[in-house]
Image (cartoon, helix red, strand yellow):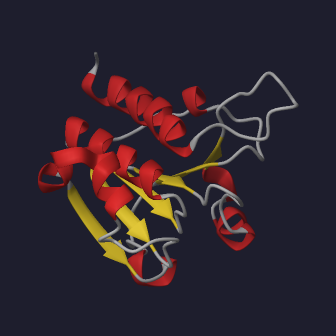
Amino acid sequence: MNVVLVEPEIPPNTGNVARLCAATNSTLHLIGPLGFRLDDRQLKRAGMDYWEHVTWKYWKSWDEFRPATAQFWLVENKTDRLYTAVTYRPDDYLVFGRETAGLPAKLLEEHRDSVIAIPQYNPAVRSLNLANCVAIVLYEALRQVKGF
């Protein structure tokens, strides 16, 4: 499975996602520009000593990253289609946006048939934490693919 963070801004979130990717043998793709340096102390602290166990790649932009034949699932709250309503495959890409702004509108339009959401029941809450969102969707995808 592939986890894609598009322009992440908060080092501890990225570090937590990296640890999650290490634990699940998922590949982490970081799409720039990033809101921090890759040698950021908070990033390393949040990922603890797991960075050596993470398969990860840094891409300068979405255009540099874009795999030709990939199935993307864009996680955003701008749809009624739930993350549990789709069928995942082992090489899918789970795509998450910036903590403060989500995914770019152009990307959402380009992949509008692949946008999925995690339900939120309290309208007063703007969004869930990025690392939590990745964990929720990644484990559902792995449950489907690995059958556990």
Q: Residue 27, image x and y in percent? A: 27, 54
Q: Position of residue 71 (x, y in %)?
A: 44, 55
Q: Residue at x 67, y 48 (%)?
A: 76
Looking at the image, residue 62 sits to the left or right of residue 80; the answer is left
Q: Quadrant of residue 56?
A: bottom left
Vertical placement of 116 versus 106: above or below? above
Residue furthest top in the image: 148
Quarter of the image where one finds residue 88: top left
Q: Is residue 58 above or below residue 44?
A: below
Quadrant location of the C terminus? top left
Q: Is residue 26 visible?
A: no
Task: Tell me: 128 left or right of 84.
Answer: right
For the point 38% across and 49% down, which residue is it? 92
At horizontal 80% and vertical 33% (from top left) the residue drawn is 125
The residue depicted at 35 percent of the width and 23 percent of the height is 143
Question: Residue 104 appears at what percent x and percent y?
Answer: 68, 68
Q: Is residue 54 above or below residue 109?
A: above
Quarter where residue 144 is shown: top left
**Depth order, front residue of 19/117:** 19
